Image (tube, rainbow, N blue to C red):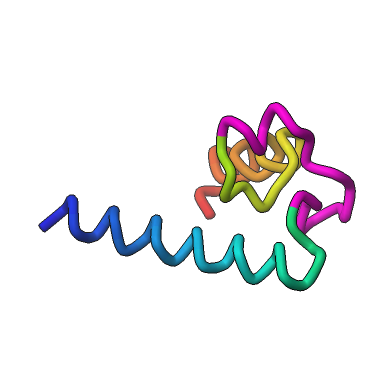
Amino acid sequence: LRTRDRERKLLKKVQQALTRVESGEYGYCEETGEPIGIPRLLARPTATLSLEAQQRREMKQKMFGD
């Protein structure tokens, strides 16, 4: 059951990435609009945030529990 949930979530992320490819937004950070960077996209093709933006988000979550 957990595997199926993970697969559904991954499929949704892949579909969203394909939509971003079609619209020309793929590879750009949703928060800053800056390029995400090839190494990050190679490691995580569904990434929507740059490494720095992701780190900031994780820090906020740790500090504020969002």
Tell me what residue is drawn at x 67 percent, y 32 percent: 40
Q: Does 53 appear in magenta?
A: no
Q: Relative to residue 10, is residue 39 drawn left or right?
A: right
User: In this view of the protein, which residue sits in the foreground, 1 or 19?
Assistant: 19
Tell me what residue is drawn at x 65 percent, y 45 percent: 57
Q: Quadrant of the N terminus?
A: bottom left
Image position of 50 with respect to 48: above or below = above
User: In this view of the protein, which residue sits in the foreground, 18 or 3?
Assistant: 18
Q: Relative to residue 54, is residue 2 drawn left or right?
A: left
Image position of 51 with respect to 34: above or below = above
Q: Position of residue 46 (x, y in %)?
A: 57, 50
Tell me what residue is drawn at x 57 percent, y 67 percent: 16
Tell me what residue is drawn at x 51 percent, y 67 percent: 15
Magenta segment, prevailing SS (helix, strand or loop): loop
Q: Position of residue 50 (x, y in %)?
A: 74, 41
Q: Relative to residue 27, is residue 63 drawn left or right?
A: left
Q: How many marks?
A: 0
Magenta stretch: give its range.
Answer: 27-43
Q: Does 36 appear in magenta?
A: yes
Image position of 50 with respect to 25: above or below = above
Instruction: Examine the image and state in which quarter residue 20 appears.
Output: bottom right
Instruction: Examine the image and state in which quarter residue 18 appears.
Output: bottom right
User: Residue furthest toward the front?
Assistant: 22
Q: Position of residue 9 (x, y in %)?
A: 37, 60
User: Residue furthest toward the left?
Assistant: 1
User: In this view of the protein, which residue sits in the foreground, 22 or 11?
Assistant: 22
